[in-house]
C-alpha cells in the first residue's frame, strides 16, 4: 500500500514563524510627496519607540523582534524607507532623502519629543546622522551592527585600484541605463527565498519564504520583491563609512552599540577596536558572540532582552 | 534649436541641439540652477560638430522629481545618458556641470574626447569633509529648477582626493595626453586637486581650451 504525500501549496504564514506577529497598525504618510509606509506594533497610547531597518530590508523584517518590544509596553514604530517595502518608489534616492523621510515619520509618531530609537545596519548609521543633526528627537539610541568604520582596502597597486573603480563605475552607469521600466525578476516563493538567502545566509528557509509573502507581491508572472528595481548593491561616492564615527563621539544621550562576531555580506565588517575610541561618554559597546549581521532575527528574544534592559521601563 | 528627450530611470531628460553639425558633438553641461542656453555660445563658434546641451534632472525642461534626493553621481548618470546617445563628445561644463563633466571624463574616458571645466554656479559644492548638516524639507514648486537640487547639490561633499581619482581615471585611459582642461578662475579645493594632477591642462578661455580638442 502506498502512502500519499501531499506537497503543501499554500504560502507560508506567520503561523510558521515562532513568535512572529504582524503589525497592529499599518498606514502611509505623505513625506513631501513621497508615500512612506509605517508599521506599528503595540498599544497606540504607549510611548513610541522608533525602529529603523537596514538597506534592502523593510519594516516587516521586524515581525519577530518588534512584538517583543511591544509586549514590554512600547508602541514600536517602524517604516519602510523610500523604494523599500510598501513605500513609494521615488524618482531619486540619497542618504539625505532617507533622513528627511525619517524626520517626517518621527514628526508624525513622536511629534518633536525625544524618544528612544533603535537602528539596524544602514538604519543604525542613518540614526547616528539624524541624532547629530536633530538631537532633540533622541532620548537614547541603540545601534545593531550599524556602525560603519574604515572600509578594508585591498592591498593592490594604484593602477589596479583605478581599474576596479572604473569597473564599479561603468557597471553602475550601465545599470542606470537599463532601469527605465525594469521590474524585479519574478519567481516562486522558493526561488525568491533562495535569492534572498544570498543576503541572509544565516536565516532559516522558513523565515526567508515567509519574508517573500510580506516583502514581495504576487503577479501573473510570479512573485517579485517590492524593492525598487533601480536599487543596486555596491556603488561609489564621496562618502566614507568611518565619517559616522565622528558624529557618534559627540552624542549627549545614552548609547548602546552592538557589533557581531560573524561577518556577513550585508555587514560592514566593523572592528570593535576602531569604534571604541568614539563611543560617547557613558555609552556601551558590545560584541555579540555567535551571531551574524541579522542578530535580531537570529536571536529575537536575547536581543529584545538586551535592548529592554538598556531602555528601562517605558515612560 | 530642437529638443529630444532621453529616459533615465523615471526621469525624462531634455537634450537640446543648439546647432547642427557633422562630426563629434560638443556637449554643454549647465551650472546649478541654470538650464541649457537657447543658442550655441560664442566659444563654440569654431566647433564644426553639433552643439548640444543637456538639462539635468530637476532643471530646464527635464523632469522635476518629487521629494529630492540629488547627488552629483545621479547627475553623472544623466550626463552618461546623453553621452551614450551621442556616441562620443567633447564636454564643456559650467560650475556644477564642470564637476559632473569631470566625473564623466573619468567614468567614460574612451567616449569623452576632452573636458573643459569652467566657472559657473555650483562650482564649489559643499564642504570637503563631513560637517553637521541640517535635515530639512522644502515646499514643492511647479517649475524647475527644483529647490531640492539647489540645496542638496549646493552642499554635496566633494573631497579633493575623490575628485582627483576621476581625473586620474581620465588621464590613464584617454587617448589624449591632456583630457581635462581647467579654465575656471575660482578654484575650490576639489578643483585645485584636479588642476594639480598630471595630464590636466590650464587655459585662459573655453575657446582656447576647445582648440586642443577639435581634432
Image (cartoon, rainbow, N blue to C red):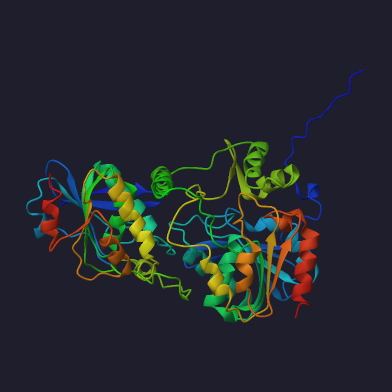
User: Is A294 left, or right, of B72 in this rendering?
Assistant: right
Q: Residue at x 15, y 49 (%)?
A: B213
Quarter of the view holding residue A41: bottom right
Q: Decide which of A312, A256 is in the foreground and name it.
A: A256
Q: Nearer the viewer, residue A303 or B127?
A: B127
**Above or below, comparing residue A174 to residue B145 in the picture:** above
**Picture quadrant of residue A146:** bottom right
Q: Position of residue A98 (x, y in %)?
A: 51, 64
In this rendering, position of residue B130 left or right of residue B119? right
Q: Is residue A109 above or below residue A8?
A: below
Q: How many numbered markers are drawn?
A: 0
Q: Residue at image x 68%, y 48%?
A: A211
* x and y percentages locating residue A128 in the rendered image: 58, 70
Q: Residue at x 31, y 46 (%)?
A: B108
In the depicted structure, whether residue A13 falls above or below residue B56:
above
Which of A217 and B45 lies nearest the eye of the viewer?
Answer: B45
Q: Position of residue B168 (x, y in %)?
A: 32, 53
Farthest residue in the top direction? A1
Residue A63 in view in this figure: no
The C terminus of chain A: image quadrant: bottom right
Is residue A13 among what the camera can see? yes
Amino acid at each position: 500500500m502506498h502512502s500519499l504525500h501531499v506537497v503543501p501549496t499554500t504560502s507560508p504564514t506567520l503561523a510558521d514563524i515562532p513568535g512572529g506577529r504582524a503589525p497592529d497598525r499599518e498606514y502611509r504618510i505623505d513625506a513631501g510627496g513621497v508615500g512612506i509606509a509605517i508599521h506599528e506594533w503595540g498599544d497606540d497610547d504607549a510611548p513610541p519607540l522608533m525602529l529603523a531597518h537596514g538597506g534592502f530590508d523593510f519594516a516587516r523584517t521586524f515581525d519577530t523582534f518588534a512584538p517583543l518590544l511591544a509586549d514590554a509596553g512600547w508602541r514600536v514604530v517602524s517604516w519602510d524607507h523610500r523604494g523599500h517595502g510598501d513605500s513609494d518608489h521615488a524618482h531619486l534616492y540619497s542618504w539625505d532623502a532617507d533622513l528627511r523621510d525619517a524626520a517626517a515619520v518621527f514628526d508624525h509618531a513622536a511629534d518633536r519629543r525625544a524618544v528612544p530609537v533603535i537602528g539596524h545596519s544602514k538604519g543604525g548609521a542613518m540614526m547616528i546622522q539624524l541624532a547629530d543633526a536633530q538631537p532633540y528627537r533622541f532620548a537614547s539610541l541603540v545601534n545593531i551592527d550599524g556602525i560603519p568604520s574604515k572600509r578594508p582596502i585591498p592591498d593592490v597597486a594604484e593602477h589596479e585600484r583605478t581599474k576596479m573603480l572604473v569597473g564599479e563605475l561603468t557597471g553602475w552607469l550601465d545599470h542606470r541605463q537599463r532601469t527605465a521600466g525594469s521590474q524585479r525578476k519574478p519567481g516562486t516563493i522558493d526561488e525568491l527565498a533562495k535569492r534572498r538567502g544570498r543576503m541572509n545566509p544565516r536565516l532559516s528557509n522558513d523565515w526567508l519564504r515567509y519574508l517573500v509573502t510580506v516583502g514581495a507581491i504576487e503577479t501573473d508572472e510570479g512573485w517579485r520583491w517590492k524593492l525598487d528595481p533601480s536599487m543596486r548593491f555596491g556603488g561609489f561616492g564621496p562618502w566614507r563609512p568611518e565619517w559616522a564615527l565622528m558624529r557618534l563621539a559627540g552624542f549627549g544621550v545614552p548609547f548602546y552599540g552592538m557589533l557581531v562576531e560573524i561577518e556577513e555580506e550585508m555587514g560592514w565588517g566593523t572592528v570593535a577596536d576602531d569604534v571604541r575610541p568614539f563611543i560617547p561618554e557613558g555609552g556601551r559597546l558590545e560584541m555579540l558572540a555567535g551571531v551574524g549581521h541579522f542578530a535580531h532575527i537570529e536571536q529575537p528574544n536575547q536581543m529584545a532582552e538586551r535592548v529592554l534592559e538598556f531602555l528601562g521601563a517605558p515612560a | 534649436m530642437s529638443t529630444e528627450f532621453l529616459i533615465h530611470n523615471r526621469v525624462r531628460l531634455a537634450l537640446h541641439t543648439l546647432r547642427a553639425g557633422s562630426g563629434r558633438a560638443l556637449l554643454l553641461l549647465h551650472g546649478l540652477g541654470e538650464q541649457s542656453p537657447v543658442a550655441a555660445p560664442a566659444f563654440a563658434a569654431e566647433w564644426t560638430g553639433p552643439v548640444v546641451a543637456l538639462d539635468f534632472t530637476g532643471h530646464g525642461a527635464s523632469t522635476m522629481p518629487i521629494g529630492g534626493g540629488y547627488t552629483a553621481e545621479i547627475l553623472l548618470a544623466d550626463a552618461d545618458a546623453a553621452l551614450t546617445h551621442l556616441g562620443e563628445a567633447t564636454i564643456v561644463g559650467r560650475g556644477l556641470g564642470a564637476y559632473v563633466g569631470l566625473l564623466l571624463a573619468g567614468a567614460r574616458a574612451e567616449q569623452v574626447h576632452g573636458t573643459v571645466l569652467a566657472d559657473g554656479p555650483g562650482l564649489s559644492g559643499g564642504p570637503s569633509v563631513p560637517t553637521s548638516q541640517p535635515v530639512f524639507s522644502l515646499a514643492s514648486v511647479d517649475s524647475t529648477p527644483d529647490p531640492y537640487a539647489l540645496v542638496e547639490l549646493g552642499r554635496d561633499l566633494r573631497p579633493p582626493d575623490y575628485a582627483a581619482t576621476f581625473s586620474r581615471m581620465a588621464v590613464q585611459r584617454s587617448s589624449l595626453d591632456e583630457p581635462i582642461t581647467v579654465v575656471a578662475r575660482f578654484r575650490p579645493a576639489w578643483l585645485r586637486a584636479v588642476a594639480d594632477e598630471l595630464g590636466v591642462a590650464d587655459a585662459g578661455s573655453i575657446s582656447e581650451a576647445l582648440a586642443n580638442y577639435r581634432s
